[in-house]
Amino acid sequence: MKKTWLILILLYTQIGISQDSNLSVMYSAQLKEMDTTFLKNKSEYIKTHLLSQFESKKEIINEIDFELICDDDGYYLSYIQPIPTDDFFKYQLTGAISRVFDANYILADKTEEVAILAGFESAVKMDRSVEMNSIIWEKAKMHKEIIGYNCQMYIGKLVNDSSAHKGHYPITAWVTDALQYSCGPTPFAILEGVILELENDDSIVTATCINRTKKSIPEYKSEFRLLSYPEYITHMEEWSKKNMPRRN
Amino acid sequence: MKTILLFLFLLTTYGAVSENNLSRENFIGNCEDRAVDVYYALLDGGATWSEAAGAFHILYTDCCFNYPLDCDEMPIIG
């Protein structure tokens, strides 16, 4: 009888442990100063407008908490939705998140080697799929510590410009192999380890805390039309040309 | 005499309404043009389409706040 009870207790604790077996990494993001060389030949109106919008995006992104859930087969990056105050805030939030991740959320399936970049309700309503191996990661010599974990530096370059938003690459990643997961806040987290920091010309995303979690990765439910990234580029270029002709 | 006065009244009223409509159309036109300029300025600076679309929508919404009857349909980008 005692044995049966012991087995039952053991099973119960095992279930408890397995429920907490996924990894949760919280991140904060910052926008870097905007490179304004492209504004040189633009009108005063555009310069003033874009610079003021950019300042408000910087403030918004500082307030957002991003969460990455990792399991053995994939990972999911999302953020805690702030309560929208008005349409202006909604569009600025979309702009800020898109500037860093080019997606409302990222859902990666490592077995299929495909990641989904979700579209935005208040912007381009299209989901995009990317091949996770369409990046080349080169190991660099540098190491640094992030929230107590020793991290190795890698530089990621796109195999070709149409595999993702080319403006976000090359990208620097700081990766720890101490957590026995392979994930990160990018559609291209195929390195052995967890990416605790990502940096490109526009932004820096840094891990703030790590926990075990019962949360699981949601299944992909297509809200919008799903295109591959090269198809998306072609579609948007053609759409813009047809519906929003450039004035000069 | 009354007919002439009525005719003149109608003529000036029509003129005023037409002028008002014209300026309103110009206003919306300029607004939309500016929104398109901002859309491309952002893309030229390396922004994503979603960021550019968001900026376009902000300006368009601003326009339509002033003249809601003229633009009840926000163009959906994509």
Image (spheres, coloured by chain):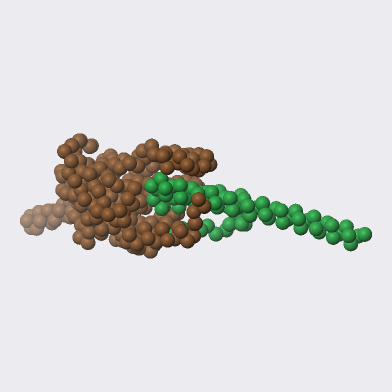
> In the picture, residue A218 is in which quadrant?
bottom left
Q: Position of residue A229 (x, y in %)?
A: 32, 58
Instruction: Give the brown chain's letter.
Output: A
Q: Position of residue A175 (x, y in %)?
A: 20, 43
Q: Is residue A152 above or below residue A162?
A: above
Task: Using residue A214 as the reference point, say whether residue A178 is left or right of it.
Answer: left
User: Would residue A90 be seen by someone viewing this image from the given angle?
Assistant: no
Task: Using residue A232 as the reference point, say whether residue B56 is left or right of it.
Answer: right
Instruction: State the residue at coordinates (45%, 40%).
Output: A40
Furthest residue toward right = B1
| Quadrant of the snapshot with the N terminus of chain A | bottom left
Task: Using residue B73 as the reference point, say whether residue A165 is left or right of it.
Answer: left
Instruction: Give the green chain's letter.
Output: B
> In the picture, residue A108 is in which quadrant?
bottom left
Q: Position of residue A222 (x, y in %)?
A: 35, 63
Front residue of A45/B57: it is A45
User: Would residue B49 be seen by someone viewing this image from the given angle?
Assistant: yes
Q: Is residue A46 above or below residue B49?
A: above
> In the picture, residue A231 is in which quadrant?
bottom left
Front residue of A157/B55: it is A157
Instruction: State the residue at coordinates (38%, 42%).
Output: A61
